[in-house]
Image (cartoon, grey):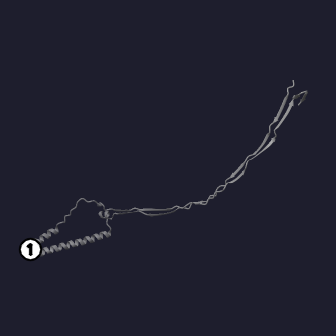
Amino acid sequence: MNVPQIRLQSTSAALSIRTTPGRMDIEQPPAVLDIQQPLAKMEIERTPSKLTIDQTEARADMDLKSARRRIEEFSQQGYEDWLTGLARVAQDGDELMMIENGGNAIAAQAKRNSEDQMYEFNIGWIPSAGSVKIGYTPGSVKVDVEPQRVINNSRPQKPNIQYTPANVDVSLKRYADLQIDFANLKHVGINYEQEI
């Protein structure tokens, strides 16, 4: 039995795609560095401290005196003793001058001049307290610093960029095709039959 058939044979279209990838080349030259740091200006003023120790009186208390001081003391003591002696002789002369008033002036003067003088003395320290004199003047330091700014003449460098864009090429590799074939196909009409 011959069954009528219609045969369809199709071929789909085919595309051809070719791509060229893009490329980017970047080169970064280093920056040109030019940095200078001037030294800071610094001034220092210093006043030294001063310590004075005067132990002249302490040495004098221990009878360790200079020749000049001994001469001054001896001359002062001699002058005072001369004044004291002058006053004593004047007083004795006045007493003798008034002997007619009574009293035993010669015996009183002999007794007074023959007795040793009584000295009063209590506790003493050698050297005496406060005989060493200490003076101190503190020192000072004045620092004046003037910082200097950094001199920066550095220059940045622009990057070198080379860019190749990507490319896509699309083309039709094969066209679409449809083939139609008939088998056992007949057209039957009135007293008519035709094979297609």
Name the residue that disc number 1 marks.
101
Q: Residue at x 17, y 74 (%)?
A: 90
Quarter holding residue 112: bottom left
Quarter holding residue 97: bottom left
Q: Describe the element under mark 1 as helix, strand or loop.
A: helix
Outermost residue toward the front? 190
Quarter holding residue 140: bottom left
Q: Is residue 136 left or right of residue 37?
A: left
Amino acid at pointer 1: Asn
Q: Nearer the viewer, residue 56 or 168?
A: 168
Q: Nearer the viewer, residue 51 or 96?
A: 51
Q: Is residue 28 left or right of residue 16?
A: left
175 relative to 103, above or below: above
Outermost residue toward the top? 1
Quick one: quadrant of the N terminus? top right
161 relative to 173, above or below: below
Q: Residue at x 83, y 33 (%)?
A: 9
The x and y percentages for residue 66 are 32, 68
The x and y percentages for residue 136 are 37, 62
